[in-house]
Image: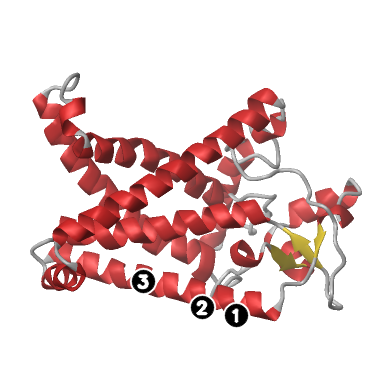
Amino acid sequence: MPDLEPTVATTTKTGGRFFTRFTRQQRYMHAVLFTTFLGLAGTGLPLRFSESIWARGLARGVGGFGAILFFHKLCAVVLTIAFLIHLKEIFTRGIVHREMGVFWGSNSMVANWKDAKDLFGHLRWFVGLGPKPNFDRYAYWEKFDYWAVFWGMIVIGFSGYAMWFAPFFAHFLPGWALNAVLVIHSEEGLLAILFIFSIHFVNTHLRPDSFPMDMVVFTGVESEEEFKLKRPLEYERLKREGKLEGRLGEAPQTWLINFSRVVGTIAIVIGLTLLVLTLTAYFS
């Protein structure tokens, strides 16, 4: 669960003000998430479409499908560890420290009635039947993306480990269930790949107010103009409560911006390439 408290204020280096949106820990966690997901997608798709020309070529280049499977499992383990660390953080903050804002309120990733109204308001705005809704700290699609990880870890993760350690799971799962987990893992994994490389990429990076890339998840900060435009309700709320200055952050350094652009571009190119290969293999 994202850190919901304002970060320690720092002094900006440029004339324009920047505000912290993500902490360093959150940025590192996202880096692990998207790196392992790309790894799982890049290794899982050749296993899923092993008869495709590109899959066989990739297998020859890395030492066979056995090597691809090894890297697939490695990425799965790293992602699982990161997920468990995140769960521990949620439990510690929400249960031990009783930070109720973790589970409810304007800073929470838990969906509420406003998210439902924003969804339908956005649909009306898309077709010109109403104004564009104003968003708070997290928009409804960001919360959907967040909880989709939990669904994926439960369904795709469990089915993957059930196949990996089939002799163990065979002690308490019937044979038909072990056959089912193969189908579930394959189809749900494919669905996750299609969602991330199309819907998530478009919502996060390719929409007009973020094109060609939303840098905030890499730099951790955004300009005041972006803050006002994308999340006016949060901006006004913090300003009204006298907490806006507490979110001030340093302008990102040039090397960080350039590095983020390179990493982000590589991730997007890999994702879109895998999307094209997936669609090509699936429909052929």
- Does the image show residue 136? yes
Q: What's the amino acid at mark 3? A: Ile
Residue identified by numbered label 3:
270
Above/below status of 41 relative to 150: below
Extreme residue in the right direction? 242
* Disc 2 to disc 1: CB gap under 8 Å: yes
Residue identified by numbered label 2:
262
Local SS, label 3: helix
Q: Nearer the viewer, residue 269 or 77?
A: 77
Q: Nearer the viewer, residue 242 or 256?
A: 256
| Residue 105 in which image quadrant | top right
Residue at (17% x, 41% y) in the render? 182
Residue at (72% x, 27% y) in the render? 97
> Which badge, 3 or 1, is on the more N-terminal residue?
1
Q: Which mark is residue 150?
A: none
> Which badge, 3 or 2, is on the more N-terminal residue?
2
* Disc 3 to disc 1: CB gap under 8 Å: no
Above/below status of 28 relative to 218: above
Mark 3 surroundings within 10 Å by alpha-carbon count, few (fewer than 14), some (14 through 19), many (20 or more)? some
Residue 23 in the figure: left or right of residue 150: right
Residue identified by numbered label 1:
258
Mark 2 surroundings within 10 Å by alpha-carbon count, few (fewer than 14), some (14 through 19), many (20 or more)? few
Mark 1 surroundings within 10 Å by alpha-carbon count, few (fewer than 14), some (14 through 19), many (20 or more)? few
Q: What's the amino acid at mark 2? A: Val
Q: Nearer the viewer, residue 191 or 262?
A: 262
